Image (tube, grey):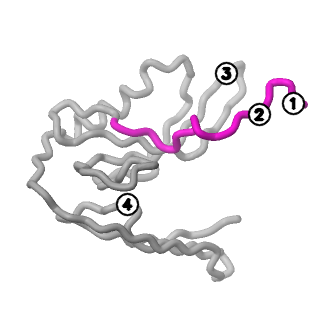
Amino acid sequence: MDEILLEANAEVDGIAVLDAGLRIGITPAGEISSLRVTSIDVEQLDNVTIQASPDRLRDSFIGSFSDSESVYESIIVTRRRPVYILDPGAMSGVVEPRYLVAYSTTTKADQVLTASRSSMLLLGMTEPRPTIELRLPEYSWLPRASQDAP
Protein backbone atom coordinates (compact mmCIF):
# COMPACT_ATOMS: atom_id res chain seq x y z
CA MET A 1 0.00 0.00 0.00
CA ASP A 2 1.28 3.46 -0.83
CA GLU A 3 1.37 5.92 2.03
CA ILE A 4 2.88 9.25 2.92
CA LEU A 5 4.58 9.27 6.31
CA LEU A 6 4.45 12.33 8.55
CA GLU A 7 6.84 12.09 11.46
CA ALA A 8 7.66 14.27 14.46
CA ASN A 9 10.31 13.20 16.97
CA ALA A 10 11.43 14.57 20.29
CA GLU A 11 14.78 16.37 20.15
CA VAL A 12 17.76 16.92 22.43
CA ASP A 13 19.84 19.96 21.50
CA GLY A 14 18.34 19.91 18.00
CA ILE A 15 19.10 16.21 17.37
CA ALA A 16 16.11 13.92 16.80
CA VAL A 17 15.45 11.12 19.30
CA LEU A 18 14.16 8.22 17.23
CA ASP A 19 11.37 6.12 18.73
CA ALA A 20 10.15 9.11 20.73
CA GLY A 21 7.41 10.77 18.79
CA LEU A 22 4.48 10.49 16.46
CA ARG A 23 4.28 8.94 13.00
CA ILE A 24 1.16 8.98 10.85
CA GLY A 25 0.78 7.21 7.51
CA ILE A 26 -1.76 8.62 5.06
CA THR A 27 -2.87 6.95 1.82
CA PRO A 28 -3.15 8.90 -1.44
CA ALA A 29 -6.94 8.83 -0.84
CA GLY A 30 -6.42 10.75 2.42
CA GLU A 31 -7.14 7.84 4.79
CA ILE A 32 -4.98 7.10 7.83
CA SER A 33 -3.12 3.87 7.07
CA SER A 34 -0.84 3.69 10.12
CA LEU A 35 -0.31 5.42 13.43
CA ARG A 36 2.59 5.06 15.85
CA VAL A 37 2.96 6.94 19.11
CA THR A 38 6.08 6.18 21.13
CA SER A 39 7.61 7.69 24.19
CA ILE A 40 10.85 7.28 26.07
CA ASP A 41 12.34 9.07 29.05
CA VAL A 42 15.43 11.07 28.15
CA GLU A 43 17.96 12.43 30.59
CA GLN A 44 20.81 14.55 29.31
CA LEU A 45 24.07 13.65 31.03
CA ASP A 46 27.26 15.33 29.82
CA ASN A 47 27.95 17.46 26.79
CA VAL A 48 29.18 15.52 23.78
CA THR A 49 31.70 16.86 21.29
CA ILE A 50 31.00 15.92 17.68
CA GLN A 51 34.35 15.42 15.99
CA ALA A 52 33.37 13.72 12.72
CA SER A 53 33.31 16.11 9.78
CA PRO A 54 30.68 15.82 7.02
CA ASP A 55 33.40 14.66 4.61
CA ARG A 56 34.57 11.92 6.98
CA LEU A 57 30.97 10.76 7.56
CA ARG A 58 30.43 10.54 3.80
CA ASP A 59 33.73 8.68 3.30
CA SER A 60 32.88 6.18 6.07
CA PHE A 61 29.49 5.52 4.49
CA ILE A 62 31.03 4.99 1.05
CA GLY A 63 33.78 2.83 2.57
CA SER A 64 31.17 0.51 4.09
CA PHE A 65 30.56 -0.85 0.57
CA SER A 66 34.21 -1.37 -0.41
CA ASP A 67 34.55 -4.90 1.03
CA SER A 68 31.47 -6.19 -0.76
CA GLU A 69 31.69 -8.60 -3.66
CA SER A 70 28.59 -7.02 -5.20
CA VAL A 71 28.76 -4.74 -8.21
CA TYR A 72 26.70 -1.67 -7.31
CA GLU A 73 24.81 0.05 -10.08
CA SER A 74 23.50 2.67 -7.68
CA ILE A 75 23.33 3.59 -4.02
CA ILE A 76 20.46 5.97 -3.33
CA VAL A 77 20.52 7.90 -0.06
CA THR A 78 17.01 8.86 1.02
CA ARG A 79 17.77 10.43 4.40
CA ARG A 80 20.80 11.51 6.38
CA ARG A 81 20.88 13.29 9.71
CA PRO A 82 22.21 13.13 13.26
CA VAL A 83 19.98 11.14 15.62
CA TYR A 84 19.85 9.53 19.02
CA ILE A 85 18.79 5.89 18.83
CA LEU A 86 18.78 3.08 21.35
CA ASP A 87 20.08 -0.22 20.01
CA PRO A 88 17.23 -2.61 19.07
CA GLY A 89 16.41 -4.96 21.91
CA ALA A 90 17.87 -2.68 24.59
CA MET A 91 15.47 -1.42 27.24
CA SER A 92 17.73 1.42 28.36
CA GLY A 93 21.21 2.76 27.84
CA VAL A 94 23.48 5.73 27.52
CA VAL A 95 23.71 6.76 23.87
CA GLU A 96 25.71 9.34 22.00
CA PRO A 97 24.56 10.98 18.78
CA ARG A 98 24.92 8.88 15.65
CA TYR A 99 24.73 9.85 12.01
CA LEU A 100 21.89 8.00 10.29
CA VAL A 101 22.07 7.27 6.57
CA ALA A 102 18.96 5.62 5.07
CA TYR A 103 19.65 4.12 1.66
CA SER A 104 18.82 1.46 -0.90
CA THR A 105 21.05 -0.19 -3.47
CA THR A 106 20.80 -1.67 -6.93
CA THR A 107 23.27 -4.42 -7.73
CA LYS A 108 24.07 -6.14 -10.99
CA ALA A 109 24.93 -9.81 -11.48
CA ASP A 110 24.84 -11.63 -14.82
CA GLN A 111 23.12 -8.62 -16.42
CA VAL A 112 20.29 -8.82 -13.85
CA LEU A 113 19.56 -5.78 -11.68
CA THR A 114 18.38 -6.34 -8.12
CA ALA A 115 17.06 -3.54 -5.88
CA SER A 116 17.35 -3.76 -2.10
CA ARG A 117 14.95 -2.81 0.61
CA SER A 118 15.67 0.38 2.48
CA SER A 119 18.45 0.00 5.04
CA MET A 120 19.99 2.25 7.66
CA LEU A 121 23.58 2.66 8.66
CA LEU A 122 24.46 4.53 11.84
CA LEU A 123 27.91 6.02 12.21
CA GLY A 124 29.55 7.30 15.37
CA MET A 125 30.08 11.05 15.47
CA THR A 126 32.29 11.53 18.53
CA GLU A 127 35.58 10.40 16.95
CA PRO A 128 37.36 12.12 14.03
CA ARG A 129 37.15 8.88 11.99
CA PRO A 130 33.54 7.66 12.19
CA THR A 131 32.94 3.94 12.58
CA ILE A 132 29.84 1.89 11.82
CA GLU A 133 27.99 1.38 15.09
CA LEU A 134 24.75 -0.13 13.88
CA ARG A 135 23.10 -1.49 10.72
CA LEU A 136 19.33 -1.71 10.47
CA PRO A 137 17.41 -3.79 9.82
CA GLU A 138 19.32 -6.65 11.37
CA TYR A 139 17.89 -9.72 9.70
CA SER A 140 19.78 -12.30 11.79
CA TRP A 141 16.72 -12.80 14.03
CA LEU A 142 14.37 -13.57 11.14
CA PRO A 143 13.48 -17.23 10.55
CA ARG A 144 15.10 -18.68 7.46
CA ALA A 145 13.24 -20.77 4.89
CA SER A 146 14.38 -24.33 4.54
CA GLN A 147 16.75 -25.00 1.65
CA ASP A 148 14.49 -27.92 0.70
CA ALA A 149 11.37 -25.76 0.41
CA PRO A 150 9.88 -25.56 -3.10
Q: Could you tell me residue 43's position as x and y percent? A: 20, 64
Q: Which residue is mark 2?
A: 145
Describe the element under mark 1 as helix, strand or loop. Answer: loop
Q: Which residue is mark 4?
A: 18
Of mark 4 and mark 2, the one earlier in the sequence is 4
Say what amino acid the circle numbered 2 marks. Answer: Ala
How many C-alpha atoms fall within 10 Å of the one at disc 3: few (<14), some, or many (≥20)? few
Tag 3 residue: 109
Dot 2, how many residues are within 10 Å of its Cα: few (below 14), some (14-19), or many (20+)? few
Spatial distance from mark 1 to mark 2, Cα to Cα?
7 Å
Task: First in sequence, mark 4 or 3: give its number.
Answer: 4
| Secondary-structure class at tag 4 | strand
SS at badge 3 = strand
In the depicted structure, whether residue 23 falls above or below residue 52: below
Q: Position of residue 52 (x, y in %)?
A: 18, 39
25 over 115 or under it: above or below: below
Magenta region: which residues?
Answer: 133-150
Considering depth in this image, is 53 or 45 the residue closer to the camera? 45
Q: Position of residue 92 (x, y in %)?
A: 33, 55
* C-alpha distance separating marks 4 and 3: 36 Å
Q: Is residue 103 above or below residue 20?
A: above
Image x and y of residue 30, in percent:
63, 82
- Measure how far apart labels 2 and 3 are at the Cα level: 23 Å
Residue closest to the eye, 114 or 32: 32
